Amino acid sequence: MADEPKKIPDVTKKTVKPKKPKIPRQKMPEQEPLIRAHNFEEVPYGYSIETAMIEASRCIMCKKPKCIHGCPVGIDIPGFIREIRDGNLKKAARIMKQSNALPAICGRVCPQEEQCEIVCVVGIKQEPVAIGRLERFIADWERDQGEIEIPEIAPSTGRKVAIVGAGPAGLTVAGELAKLGHQVTVFEALHKPGGVLMYGIPEFRLPKAIVEAEVDYVRQLGVEFVYNAVIGKYFTLDELMEEEGFHSIFIGSGAGLPYFMNIPGENLIGVYSANEYLTRSNLMKAYDFPNYDTPIIRSKKVAVIGGGNVAMDSARTALRLGADDVYLVYRRSRVEMPARDEEIHHAEEEGIDFRLLTNPIKINGDENGRVKSMTCIKMELGEPDASGRRRPVPIEGSEYEVEVDTVVVAIGNGANPLLPEATPELKTNKWGNILAEDETGLTSMKGIYAGGDIVIGAATVILAMGAGKSASKAMNEYLMSLDV
């Protein structure tokens, strides 16, 4: 029997395994725009456990994770995401808390898209892993499940530390130094802790119960809080050191001095700085009328000047306080807006009227000295300025008037001047910011450190926390070098 001819394989037909479909970035469910525009409840609801595990599975666990270097406080991001993916939620929370004492806050308000997520390798070919949303999820899970654990506190060192300001920088330093065994007291000028977290960011973006829970964690580390204590008036820095026995001080008093445009009419009734407007609503709960009777103008037509997160917060607050029309007036285009993309998107969805490439030149009043309108001029973009953004240039003859009864100025804040003015030996720059070393936060005064907005100007929560973390290391070394 003749041998059968051998079958020659058809090399033109390759067996290709079907590619595993890529998992898309998981969306967070949130309130419908037309509903949320009339309440102060939080807009996004957060991930479920199942959704969080799916999103966590998108992380490819890089050998050299750039996301960690993108995080100002150095969170082990792949580490906590891996544990979420595997369902080890308690362990994920522990990894998170090793580096960040305020994860529920950071997960809500930090610009992850400009820090950890922008360098995510997954983001090269698809959307980056939703690191911020996972951070929020694990912090909320830990709190809701009653799984918060207080880490072991080192034995007392006998060293006393004063913190000026209970904002993100001050809270970070307080928590870090308390864990190391130092006796820490935080002096806060307001009647509640949290700083800008409490007075500046609205309830619908950062519920105050979340801030209070995060502060309570710091309190459980052994930190003492003293309220209504304006350092510079209540105590000077010298008195804290020489009379109250503190060995070192951290200044995190923030950027609480509002800027104005210096245009005619800014002294009219109905013109607010964003600081005052948001403080009345957030800290003093003007939004919760009649349970709270904090006075605030119930406006019908509001103009908010600015394009940052504070401007978005002010505009969205005005809408929720009952305004029929809210104009966001910004002298550049949408591309140059410094606000987070998510906040701009939410504002647009809720019906905020964006008046871009527009600059106010005068606020007009009625016979009673109240705001009745605002004169604006149209702008066009010229060459880039020092900020790298294209400089807005007025278009001659393009003036027009907008009918408004309230104007909120949200164009930035300067350093709180009280403490430097009360302490001449504390060196500042021409803008009034305290001069401090980048790596350590050390000021011109021995044993006194500073960080956050009082040093770099109004910035983000996480940058303030990063400054606090760096300063706490330097302060610990200084404190342990003392003979006490």
Image (cartoon, rainbow, N blue to C red):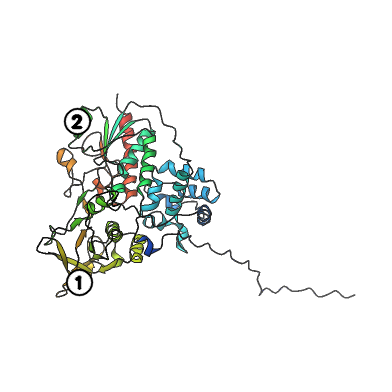
Is 165 left, or right, of 96 in this rendering?
Answer: left
- Of the two numbered discs 1 and 2 on the same chain, state the one appearing first in sequence: 2
Residue at the limit of the structure toward the top, as seen here: 484
Mark on residue 239? 2
- Give 295 or 421, whichever is nearer the viewer: 295
- At 46% from the left and 40% from the top, the residue drawn is 148
Q: Residues within 10 Å of mark 1 (few under 14, many from 20)?
A: many
Residue type at tag 2: Glu
Could you say where residue 325 lies in the image, as x and y percent from the top left?
26, 66
As drawn, the residue found furthest toward the left would be 367
Residue 458 visible? The answer is no
Quarter that holds the C terminus: top left
Residue for point 46% across, 45% down: 144
Q: Are marks 1 and 2 in contact (CB under 8 Å)?
A: no
- Residue 34 lies in what quarter of the image? bottom left
In-front residue for pair 283/54 = 283
Q: Is residue 212 visible?
A: yes
Which label was assigned to residue 378?
A: 1
Q: Quadrant of the N terminus?
A: bottom right
In the drawing, does residue 450 fall left or right of residue 223? left
